[in-house]
Image: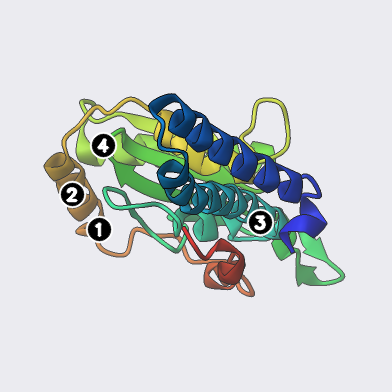
Amino acid sequence: MTRKHDPSAIWLMILAFVVVLLVAIGIGIWIDQVIYLSIIGIPLAFLAAIFILSRRAEKAAFSQIEGQPGATSAVLGSLRRGWYFDQEPVAAEAGGKMRGMRDMHNAAMVFRAVGRPGVVLISEGPKVAATRLALAEKRKTSRVIGKDIPVHIINVGKADDQVALSKLLKKLRSYDKSITKDEALAVQRRLRALGPTKAAVPAGVDPNRARADRRSMRGR
């Protein structure tokens, strides 16, 4: 699956394997321990190749769900310890009607993640509607947690001023740490303690169904 979406993945894996092994052998020659360093270098070379595969597989998996309603929720599920997020959108607005039915593919949604950078609101869907929802949610969030906690907005999409789904995790990790882990947990609890503040998900949209292919991400 990874090679189908990223043909260069196999060559990058081979390159990583060869480079790590050559470095190990080179160090072995330098300290006159070629056999010992070669034995150590082989598993390290395999580890480097697997690391490249996991990264490329993750990117390929995210590309499969890009554009699907609720795809942001699937990406947030890959966040590591220290982040808190809601699987359902905190704000949602269904798209227009298509042959008498709601066009769920044009639904605008806003998801929320809380970590040491503060609160991050991630919007997806039609840019204008998604931006409007995110700004409204930012004002509401700031009233609840106060102005001392940063509230960031990320708009997921393919435009120049948007963040691609495959780069969302990298964007989240790029923010400066502004609060402690305990403060992040307190903010998450305070937002959840508000009760039913989440907007109802438009009928026919289940963010939990928009998931990356976990098999392709094994080895992480």
* Label 2 secondary element: helix
Nearer to us: label 3 or label 2? 2
* Label 1 secondary element: helix
Disc tally is 4
Q: Residue at x 37, y 35 (%)?
A: 139
Tag 1: residue type?
Answer: Arg
Where is residue 156 drawn, in percent x and y? Answer: 61, 41
Instruction: Quote the CA–CA distance across marks 2 and 4.
Output: 9 Å
Is tag 2's residue or tag 4's residue first in the polypeptide sequence? 4
Instruction: Quote the CA–CA distance across marks 3 and 2.
Output: 30 Å
* Label 4 secondary element: loop
| CB contact under 8 Å: marks 1 and 3 | no
Nearer to us: label 1 or label 2? 2
Is tag 1's residue or tag 3's residue first in the polypeptide sequence? 3
| CB contact under 8 Å: marks 3 and 2 | no
What residue does disc 1 label?
A: 192
Looking at the image, is 17 positioned above or below residue 177?
A: below
Q: Which residue is more in the foreground, 34 or 73?
A: 34
Is tag 3's residue or tag 4's residue first in the polypeptide sequence? 3
Instruction: Quote the CA–CA distance across marks 1 and 2.
Output: 11 Å
Which of the labelled discs sits on residue 185, or is there none? 2
Which of the labelled discs sits on residue 107, or is there none? 3
Tag 4: residue type?
Answer: Arg
Tag 2: residue type?
Answer: Leu
Left-right relation of 118 to 198: left
